[in-house]
Image: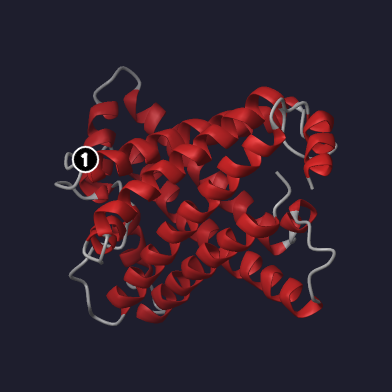
Amino acid sequence: MVGRLAREGARTGSQGGTGREVVARCGLVARGLLYVLVGVLAVRVAFGDGGQEADRTGALQELAEKPLGGFLVWAVGIGLVCMMLWRLSEAVFGAAGPDGGKASKRLASAARTVFYGVVAFSVLSFAAGSGGGRSGDEQSRDVTSKVMELPGGPWWVGAAGAAIAVGGIVIAVQAARRSFRKQLEMGRVPEGVRKAVVFLGVAGGLARGALFTAAGAFLVYAAVSYDPSQAKGVDDTLRAFAETPAGPWLLVLVGAGLVLFGLFSWALACWRRV
């Protein structure tokens, strides 16, 4: 095992294959837990239990109320720091695989580093008692309002929304094409388990892509209408699915898909090539 990891690290340019593997798998476990909790909260909202917000803040509040909740919230925050460090290592040394050193992949990893850095800071702030007062929706509207006040602000907001929406489409397309299979090392895993992991990846990726695409579209609409209140966080975006002609059942479908993506993240923690 050590020899294989060393060879892989050398092939991708990494200077610490085993260290990167540890932080990557810890990060994937933490990400998976958040998605499972958000998905469960979204399903609750669909069935009329809308007391808890279906977003990262709501998930952390739910987790904090459990036995050892404070410890678990800190663990999630540290796990997301690990996720950031993994993506940073990919940006610097290249990702696993024959084309992991391409500039496009390094740039994508750099963007993910920034994203997970922001998320980790938010979770750790919540754990420290300084980040639990405002919902994700409020934060999204406040940030949008501040950016809109800058020179060319609506263009910046629109560009950010378009990037998020396009990213969501890419996530969904890659999930539908099962592109993630080339990242897995499951040669000795039973066929039934492999099929289950592929199902989790497809269903979960489609739901995650739909969420990102919708959130980006709302941000673009906020820019076009010059109305920051039209920007939506995860909770408001998920609730918007229930307002479509499909009604709450579309929200149930998306929420269940986010739970499946969380489970897929745990599967990646076991079998992803890092």
Residue 267 position within the rendered picture, expressed as x and y whole percent measured from the top left: 62, 63
On the rendered structure, is 7 left or right of 82? Answer: right
Name the spot of residue 11 as percent of width and height, x first. 84, 31
In the rendering, at what x and y percent does residue 171 appear?
A: 61, 53
Quarter of the image where one finds residue 263: bottom right
In the shown orientation, is residue 100 left or right of residue 83?
right
Mark 1, residues whose alpha carbon is within 10 Å: few (<14), some, or many (≥20)? Answer: few
Which residue does the image show at 30% across and 40% down from the upper left?
124
**Extreme front residue here?**
2
Say which residue appears at 21% left-offset and 66% top-offset.
52
Residue type (three-letter) at the residue carrying disc 1: Ala
Q: Which residue is denoted by mark 1 in the rendering?
A: 128
Secondary structure state at the residue bearing disc 1: loop
Q: Nearer the viewer, residue 20 or 144?
A: 20
**Residue in the foreground of this view, choosing between 198 and 235:** 198
The quadrant holding residue 143 is: top left
User: Quadrant of the image for the C terminus?
Assistant: top right
Report which quarter residue 20 is drawn in: top right
Residue depicted at x 78% and y 41%: 5
Where does residue 226 sit, x and y in percent of width and height?
27, 37
Of 110 and 78, nearer the camera is 78
Tell me if I can see residue 228 in this picture: no
Residue that protrudes farthest toward the left in the picture: 133
Outermost residue to the top = 151
Relative height, residue 24 to residue 251 (above, below) = above
Q: Is residue 195 above or below residue 7?
A: below
Residue 33 visible? The answer is: yes
User: In the rendered view, would you say 19 is above or below 246?
Assistant: above
**Is 12 located above or below residue 74 in the figure?**
above
Report the side of 167 relative to 236 (left or right).
right
Visual colour scheme: secondary structure
